[in-house]
Amino acid sequence: MSEERIEAENEIKSEDNDVLIECDGLVKIFKTTEIEVMALQGLDMVIKKGEFLTVIGKSGSGKSTLMNIIGGLEKPSAGRIIVDGRNLSDYTEKEMVEYRGKTVGFVWQNSNRNLYPYLTALENVEAAMCFSGRKKSEKKERAMELLSLTGIDHKKDSIPAQMSGGEQQRVAIAVALANDPKLLLADEPTGAVDSKTSDMLQDLFRKLNRMLGITIIIVTHDMKLADKTDRVIMISDGKISTEKIMKEKYRQEFDKLSDDDLNFNIHEEYSVMDKAHRVQLSEDILKEAGIDGNKVRITVEDGKVVITH
């Protein structure tokens, strides 16, 4: 990534009112009596309002930890995270509970974390608005709107056990949207459904992003889902190593693309330079370049940075 791009991103952090989330040097350390694990190692990231992106990475890369910090479920060990202009570390416990209930909507892979098993679909969405101040009639009307929006209103009187996994996830998305959050976080939302249902959920997330303008962050192993988002953030060893950004021509005509079109490279891939000017190279790049040691030679040739071994 060029120095001009880094300077532009730093400018965005300080001046751009469209920024929703800014992660600045995030560190997260988990300690036990025997070991200490650094899940995030000085991660920097900027997410704008209305973005639709996925976070991918191997198990243990730090992607779920990042999502939990953004969602206010965990606090960083160092660094700061600013959401909508406020540092989450400055929140009181009461404010953090309100943040999780109003600013963020969660969709988990396990439906047991999303829905009450003894309530109908309609009642589950209404329950999410318990402390919203809405009248009972307003809650019911809003719940029906959301069930209709997610295409599951025909199951309004069914409990989770009477629904398929995909239907449960549609209800879960309606629940997550109940309090009009600015941010929707989804953890492996297609991990427990078949490929056909996965495609339907992928299309639904994109539809909601476009219709509502809501920022959506999905943590996933599903590369097919990642390829359908506007931006893909790849985490390795607790830091962002690579970003893939959908080319503008594909973003504008995405709905016209076939599954075969998605097999082509519709994203531009960038290696990410941190504030210390360090760049992580992916294993695929190292393998393709034949680099298997820990020392490389870096030169500049015709204005291009060349890495050899």
Image (spheres, grey):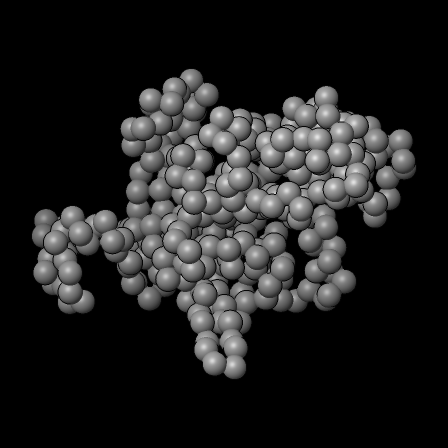
Which of 31 and 276 lies nearest the eye of the viewer? 31
173 versus 23 height, above or below:
above
Compared to residue 145, the image places residue 62 above or below, namely below
- Tally of marks: 0
The residue positioned farthest toward the bottom in the image shown: 33
The residue drawn where x is 65% and y is 35% is 168
Check the image and report above or below for 250 versus 216.
above
The answer, for residue 240, to whether it is visible in the render is no
Residue 302 location (% of width, % of height): 10, 49
Would you identify the image quadrant in which residue 99 lies? Answer: bottom right
Please name the residue shown 74% across and 42% down the image: 117
Residue 275, picture quadrant = bottom left
Whether residue 229 appears in this view of the structure is yes
Q: Quadrant of the C terminus?
A: bottom left
The x, y position of residue 10, in whole percent, is: 42, 56
In the figure, 128 relative to 174: above or below? below
Q: Residue at x 54, y 54 (%)?
A: 67
Could you say which is closer to the camera, residue 223 or residue 211?
Answer: 223
User: Residue 38's image quarter?
Assistant: bottom left
Question: Which residue of the protein is positioned furthest toward the top in this rendering?
Answer: 256
Q: Which residue is located at x 54 percent, y 47 percent?
A: 187
Viewed as shown, does residue 297 lie left or right of 262? left
Q: Which is nearer the eye, 206 or 23?
A: 206
Residue 80 lies, in percent from the top left, at 54, 65
Instruction: Give the left or right position of residue 145, taking residue 200 as reference.
Output: right
Is 179 positioned to the left or the right of 242 in the image? right
Residue 223 location, x and y as percent?
A: 39, 39
